[in-house]
Image (cartoon, helix red, strand yellow):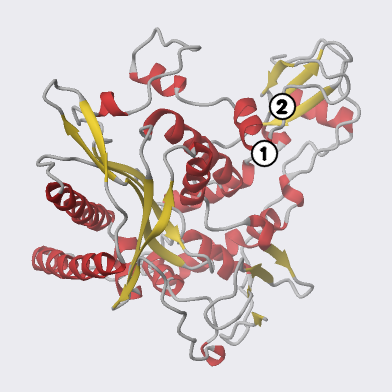
């Protein structure tokens, strides 16, 4: 049979199964209920978009030994372990953090230019605009382009004041769909060099550093963003012909942009003290007080990981004795609350609003870092000389820029997952087991379940009278 083993089967493997985690159990128990409720609410009966359901299904299969695994063996002491396959989905919650590490390593090693200071510009929007941005990917692109052009123009103007007539800069942006309180909050994290490149007389490029922005500069830029946003929306509204009624996902997104708080528990929030290089005007917030020195690439990678991080942390989710789930906030919300308690279907519906649209890229590049810019090959870091690339095709270049999982975990945690925990020798992949009969035989031999955990069927959602309990 395909994948049959020639070596003795491992006998002491006791995995921490994804099905044993609270996050997995909540989705498995309430996903079909949420999907059926969405179908019942939608006028056409289709419910949520197909890519939302497929994302949930892939997540439920991610990391299950029952779906296939690799047999990894130490040939010295015969230590063996089974490594389950990943779903390789970009919106998988369990894979999202590893994907952030991978992308952060790629950006720092292969894309972000060396020898320049960086500043993070964070732009968030009022709630009425968040709903529209979640529904309109083209508007997100237009808003991001407008925002980047405003900051670029600000850099070029300051460069002209210093005698540089044709300076150009760059930007790497991560579009975040969620907020810290498990709410839908589309906002931009944009990393921009603190200066501009310009072409010298001999044709070479040189980077000119600029001083950091002032509080007054941030306030002016925020007002400019608001004016440009009004003009952009006016033009798009004049061309709109879509009068269709909002679908179920639109209602869920409109609900999710609100903080997960019961109305009766909201108290007037205390105004936080003014922060440096931060402006809040009419719901628009621009923050630019986070910077990284050119010599500290480790700090730059930590900042990029923060920009790319998933908004939902599975470790903060717990389940109460009455079946409801509680999501613990990292920091108290504006009212001082520390968690949100709700039923399972509502939690799944909240997660559905944080799944990116199909064929959407959440990481964008502008200016000198854009793919078609003539200066890009001259400013990005050169490929490592210890791993020359002989194949210059797009696929080969992409693979060459990726870290393998062992190198990635060693870079982040300092652990070498290719080292045997018993004797210290190297581990080797013995076989990739994908045939269902072989999978079942090996798992039965180990005393593990050979069938995937069951998914609960749809049932009537719980009724809590429309009120949600809040942690304190």
- Residue 362 seen by the camera: no
- Please indicate whether residue 231 sits to the left or right of residue 218 in the image: left
Could you say where residue 165 lies in the image, as x and y percent from the top left?
9, 42
Can you tell which mark lies on residue 461? Answer: none
Task: Please tell me how crowded label 2 is: few (under 14), some (14-19), or many (20+) other residues with Cα within 10 Å.
Answer: some
Q: Quadrant of residue 380?
A: top left
Residue 342 vs residue 232, the one in the foreground: 232
Q: Quadrant of residue 201?
A: top left
- The answer to whether 148 is drawn above or below residue 374 in the figure is below
Which of the image's four quarters has the N terminus?
Answer: top right
Residue 377 vs residue 84, the one in the foreground: 377
- Please indicate whether residue 305 sits to the left or right of residue 238 in the image: right
Task: Please tell me how crowded label 1 is: few (under 14), some (14-19), or many (20+) other residues with Cα within 10 Å.
Answer: many
**Residue under the point 43% across and 44% down:** 293
Could you say where residue 334 lies in the image, as x and y percent from the top left?
52, 80
- Residue 331 seen by the camera: yes
Could you say where residue 256 lies in the image, as x and y percent from the top left?
46, 71
**Residue under the point 49% across and 59% down:** 352
Which of the image's four quarters has the C terminus?
Answer: bottom right
The mark nearer the N terminus, 1 or 2, is: 1
Q: Which residue was labeled with disc 1?
A: 63
Q: Which residue was labeled with disc 2?
A: 416
Could you say where residue 19 lies in the image, as x and y percent from the top left?
73, 49
Cα gap from disc 1 to disc 2, whole angstroms: 20 Å
Which residue lies most toward the front here? 162
| Secondary element at tag 1 | loop
């Amino acid at each position: 049979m395909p994948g049959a083993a020639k070596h003795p089967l491992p006998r002491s493997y006791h995995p921490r199964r994804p099905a044993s985690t609270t996050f997995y159990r909540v989705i498995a128990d309430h996903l079909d209920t949420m999907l059926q409720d969405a179908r019942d609410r939608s006028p056409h009966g289709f419910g949520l978009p197909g890519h939302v359901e497929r994302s949930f299904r892939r997540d439920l299969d991610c990391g299950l030994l029952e779906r296939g695994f690799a047999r990894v063996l130490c040939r010295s002491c015969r230590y063996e372990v089974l490594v389950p396959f990943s779903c390789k989905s970009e919106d998988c919650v369990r894979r999202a953090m590893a994907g952030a590490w991978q992308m952060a390593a790629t950006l720092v090693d292969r894309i972000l230019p060396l020898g320049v200071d960086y500043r993070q510009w964070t732009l968030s929007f009022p709630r009425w605009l968040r709903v529209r941005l979640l529904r309109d990917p083209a508007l997100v692109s237009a808003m991001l382009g407008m925002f980047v052009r405003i900051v670029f123009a600000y850099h070029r103007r300051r460069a002209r004041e210093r005698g540089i007539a044709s300076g150009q800069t760059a930007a790497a942006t991560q579009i975040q769909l969620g907020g810290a309180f498990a709410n839908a909050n589309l906002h931009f994290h944009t990393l921009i060099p603190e200066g501009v490149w310009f072409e010298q007389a001999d044709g070479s490029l040189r980077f000119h550093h600029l001083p950091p922005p002032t509080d007054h500069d941030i306030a002016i830029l925020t007002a400019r963003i608001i004016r440009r946003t009004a003009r952009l929306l006016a033009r798009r509204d004049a061309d709109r012909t879509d009068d269709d009624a909002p679908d179920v996902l639109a209602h869920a997104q409109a609900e999710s942009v609100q903080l997960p708080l019961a109305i009766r528990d909201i108290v007037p929030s205390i105004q936080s003290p003014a922060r440096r290089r931060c402006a809040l005007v009419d719901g628009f917030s621009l923050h630019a007080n986070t910077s990284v020195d050119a010599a500290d690439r480790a700090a730059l990678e930590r900042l990029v990981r923060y920009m790319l991080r998933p908004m939902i942390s599975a470790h903060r989710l717990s389940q109460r004795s009455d079946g409801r789930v509680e999501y613990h906030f990292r920091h108290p919300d504006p009212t001082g609350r520390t968690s949100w308690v709700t039923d399972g279907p509502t939690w799944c519906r909240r997660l559905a609003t944080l799944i990116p649209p199909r064929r959407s890229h959440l990481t964008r590049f502008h200016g000198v870092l854009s793919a078609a810019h003539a200066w890009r090959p001259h400013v990005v870091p050169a490929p490592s000389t210890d791993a020359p690339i002989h194949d210059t095709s797009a696929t080969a270049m992409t693979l060459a820029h990726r870290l393998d999982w062992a190198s990635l975990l060693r870079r982040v945690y300092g652990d070498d997952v290719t080292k045997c925990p018993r004797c210290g020798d190297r581990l080797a992949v013995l076989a990739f087991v994908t045939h269902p009969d072989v999978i079942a035989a090996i798992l039965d031999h180990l005393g593990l379940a050979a069938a995937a955990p069951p998914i609960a069927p749809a049932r009537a959602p719980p009724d809590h009278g429309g009120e949600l309990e809040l942690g304190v």
